[in-house]
Image: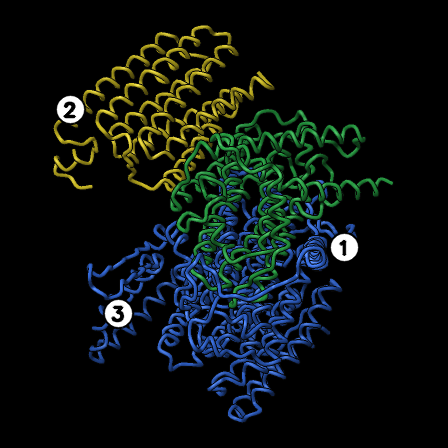
Chain colours: A green, B blue, C yellow
Amino acid sequence: MAVIVDVAIQGAQMLLVLLLSPLLTGFVRKIKARLVRRQGPPLLQPYRDLIRLMRKDVVLAQSASWLFRVVPYLVFATTWVALSLVPTFRTGLLFSWSADLIAIIALLGSARFFLALAGLDVGTSFGGIGSSREVMIASLAEPAMLMIVFMLALIAGSTQLSTMSAFMNSSEVGLRVSLGLGLIALIMVAIAENARIPVDNPATHLELTMVHEAMILEYSGRHLALIELSASLKLLLYVSLIACLFAPWGMGTTEAGPQALAIGALTYIGKLAVGGFLLAMFETAIAKMRVFRVPEFLGAALMLALLATLLRFVSRSF
Amino acid sequence: MTLIIALNCIAGLLAVTVLAVVIGRASVAAQIVYGASLIGSLILLFAAIGHLLGAADPVSMTLPLGLPWLGTHFRIDTLSSFFLAVVDLGIAAASLYALGYGRHEQAPQRVLPFYPAFLAGMNLVVLADDAFTFLISWEFMSLSSWALVMAHHRVRENVHAGYVYLIMASFGTLTLLLAFGLLAGPDGDYTFAAIRAAHPSAGLVALVLILALIGAGSKAGLVPLHIWLPLAHPAAPSHVSALMSGVMTKVAVYGFVRIVFDLLGEPAWWWGIPVLTIGAASAVMGVLYALMERDLKRIFAYSTIENVGLIFVALGLALSFKAHGMPLAAALALTAGLLHVFNHSLFKSLLFFGAGAVLTATGERNIERLGGLIHRMPQTAFVMLIGCIAVSALPPFNGFVSEWLIFQAILLSPQLPSWGLKFLVPAVGALLALSAALAAACFVRAFGIAFLGRPRTPAAEQAREVDRFSLAAMFACAAFCLIVGVLPGLFIDTLAPVVRSLVGARMPVQIGVEWLSIVPVAESRSSYNGLLVFFFIFMSGSLAAFAIHRLASDKLRRAPAWDCGYPDASPATQYTASSFAQPIRRVFGTLVFRAREQVVMPKPGDPGPARMSVELRDLIWDMLYTPIAGAVMLTAERLNGLQFLSIRQYLSLVFAALVILLLVIASWP
Amino acid sequence: MQGLVFDIAHMLAGSLVLVSFMQLYQDRLSALLNMFALHALVLALSVAWQAYVQAAPHLYITALIALVFKAIVIPVVLHRIIVRLGIHREIENVVGVGLTMLAGIGLVALAMVVMLRVTPGADPLAREDLAFALSVVLIGLLMMVTRRNAVSQVIGFMSLENGLVLAATGAKGMPLVVEISVAFSILIAFIVIGIFLFRIRERFDTVDISALDRFRGERR
């Protein structure tokens, strides 16, 4: 019986994140528009875009290889698998032990690896620009992320996300300097990883300012839909990750009954709304930086994460 | 029994060497030599696996060869059987590959005799049980591989590569010679059993550790002793490159492990520090060099330096844990290191095979003159993609598993009491994370520029898929990469007896864990299941494909690339390897390589092309090797005068040397 | 002194280090000034918290001084100065940001080792607070070394002083007199430096101190 419940909850989580992710993207867009006094697209616009893109023919570049056609599915699959292992409304997911946080980061790394290859596949100059900048950003964001994971793992005594988030929900944690540093670094990494302002602009097709969009320039139809969907999944993943590690309140535990699960789901949606709102505020308030300023930004994230880890190594009370 | 079989196989390989000298020019010679090597290495492989799986007791043997009072000692224990398995799996793959690849060899008589000799040398090092045999085999391995590097001796840069390799190899052997000399002590008992039983003083042991690190490290390619490696490995024929990079560096790791973990006894607290520092430096420097490189084989050679760095970081962690009485953590770190030894030999062989295939098909090693090979060589491209994913440490392939284990070991290290390690280990962790991310960038670049995009030259346009033997070898390696990636528990358990013999503990048994996960310490702490991850990715990818094709649209049409409205540009407008690396060069290169970009724009109205050039400087070469070379030259200049003495003066020199030696002996305590 | 009290004190001291790092990251003068104001604000909070924890009312005065002078008056005045000098957008760094921050990490590590090793028996709160304070001092010095502009050197100097105040309050308070005298000496130093800035500017048309080296016949 318990297994069935676990399977159901794991399945519910996978469906939930898949269905919620375009909504979060739409929500951020809407808030951003409202903040600059525009009407903005309807909240459900991302769903409509996805459905329309799925129905359209794929226009494939003549020089594209099989890899180019496989990549969208791979990117979508890895991102989705990664996200379905992040606790959202309940800890102790059925398959949470199949990949810990390090593996989740590596899964996202795989997604980026494939996407960067796809950018090079058609053999156009823009694809190359996008890929080369993306790997440069990743080469700093990924170590920063790993250092944050190290710091959290040293506090929680585990790299297992469910265990970590259960630990962060307990009263043992308290305020920690290293946690503060880690949170700031994690936010910086999340901004860079999701190609948000000030690192990249998700809404631009201006050739000199784009990174992520340049990489996927040749995609169309269902391929593009999958890549857009993966991008929203990734945004949802990072927001959920921050929520489950730094704001784990209200999350259901393994023994939670239906009522606790409902509370967990409601608080989760609330956290997403807050996260999306803060992201929109931040993006509206700040200007995009030059590409070669990005390494400094991410370097700072790496340094903060390293400092946090170092503090944890030195003394248990930091 | 195992040992006898192994020694007979090695003797067989030496016999093949003699045979190859005789029939070297015959047309079937390549088939015979590589076929015989394949069979011999397979027998050795099965013997080694049998010994390892049976976790049998060590077997020793003394042959009445070599020095009259010493004999030649051989021994197979779990450590040597593991390395024997790694070596012979690599050899088997390379020999299979060479059955096809070797046909394109222009000068087979320069390759065939040395190839089995090289194989025999590597096997002998692993089996040697006294310092004398070890050093002789080591030098035999070095010299035969040197001969293989010099196979195409008419190419200018190969001569340079061979020269540097010879010097560095001799230097490495010299330090190992000193290390063993110190270990053997004044009584001069060179058997490993006697060395193990002796208890040398702490200072002496420290000196031996440093000498072993230098000696084995120079062969393994640790920074700053790596300079020969990116020159020599690519210069050899590709199957030999694969062996040198994938296997010979592992023999060097074996030498280090044998001396430091086995012969030296209990480690002191600081032993991990130099090993960790040099390992982490090698990991980052290796991959940064690789990112700046354009030659496919040299990229892979530099990546070897990175991976050897990773292995040494794991070994350094194991030493630190062992010294502080944490055998379980030491077992985890050592297992991670040894698993990476195995993994690296798999994917690095695969990558060099692929580079060889590209070289055969196009005659090019410079990736900026390739492109679009995925259309012309789909199978090679597929296996190379797997190799690139594996070496970039991405799940669900094998590179990720060992790197994940190393990270888990790092996470155990705050319990280490010493302050130096408390600061060093997080920094090492950051450097490893950096090198992993840079490795992914490096292999996106290598694969993307060489195999994807549009062909940049006619040679790349007319590439043809390679022969069946080569493909079989590459597919076998790729399959192993996936198997180790999804079923790591089996291999971790296989390593248990090796680890137990070296640090006195083992990782928890993995085979019984539910769903074949791996659990390094405890399940609440961390676990990873490559099989499930692979399955999930496969399932959700296919599910998405199926659903979309059925429910939405499966239509597809081809059109010219859009490229933001600049259609039909020439292939020359694609990103090249250098331009791809430019952002990373700007971030890291200005510091590490003193990278300078120079743009020369023509004057307004001048139709001439604008030119951009990049200048990189190898600071290690400039700051370490150039002064040494200068000093050697200067000394040689000074000593030049000694060539023009009279006979009486020469005699007096000899006489003085004799008297001084006698004096030294007389005053020796 | 355990639990939340302890954690908040730590958190504030840690934030001071964090803001010091943010100062290293900024390369525009006006942004740097804002960071300095934030630095002083965090310091004021930290001192006030110590005052509350230690029930030492005189520390509230210290906090107030920090708040009024360092978080408001000095940044505003300096801001006016740099706007008048027309250098509020100037970017100046001798060493790159990444390297500076790396050096900063090294200094923090050094501070930790020194403090935690030297004082194994001391009260853990004071001990780790001292380590943070030393880090702030060292980073302040680092900033003075890596910046070329006289204004940012002043800021580096004052954040160094913030570190000293943090150390003093953490160590169960020093007498108010010392406190005030330190504050005044800083103020005087600030005025002197401010006047110097204008003098330098009048003479050399820049506040880049490498100009001074040139006039002394030195080379950078």
Q: Position of residue A211 (x, y in %)?
A: 46, 50
* Crowd band around label 3 with a 10 angstrom C-alpha radius: few (<14), some (14–19), many (20+): few
Q: Are marks 2 and 1 in contact (CB under 8 Å)?
A: no
Q: Secondary structure at mark 1?
A: loop
The quarter of the image holding the N terminus of chain C is top right
- How many marks overall? 3
Separation of marks 3 and 2 at Cα, in angstroms: 61 Å
Q: Position of residue B173 (x, y in %)?
A: 46, 67
Q: Position of residue B263 (x, y in %)?
A: 58, 58
Residue beneath label 3, please?
Answer: B636
Whether residue B440 is visible to the viewer of this picture, yes or no, is: yes
Residue type, numbered disc 1: Ile
Q: Secondary structure at mark 2?
A: helix
Q: Secondary structure at mark 3?
A: helix
Q: Chain of mark 3?
A: B
Q: Are marks 1 and 3 in contact (CB under 8 Å)?
A: no
Whether residue B335 is visible to the viewer of this picture, yes or no, is: no
The quarter of the image holding the C terminus of chain C is top left
Residue type, numbered disc 2: Arg
Separation of marks 1 and 3 at Cα, in angstroms: 62 Å
Residue beneath label 2, please?
Answer: C199
Q: Chain of mark 1?
A: B
Q: Chain of mark 2?
A: C
Quarter residue A275 falls in = top right
The residue lying toward the viewer, choosing from B424 and A266, is A266
- Res B511 label: 1
Residue type, numbered disc 3: Ala
Q: Residue at x 56, y 79 (%)?
A: B466
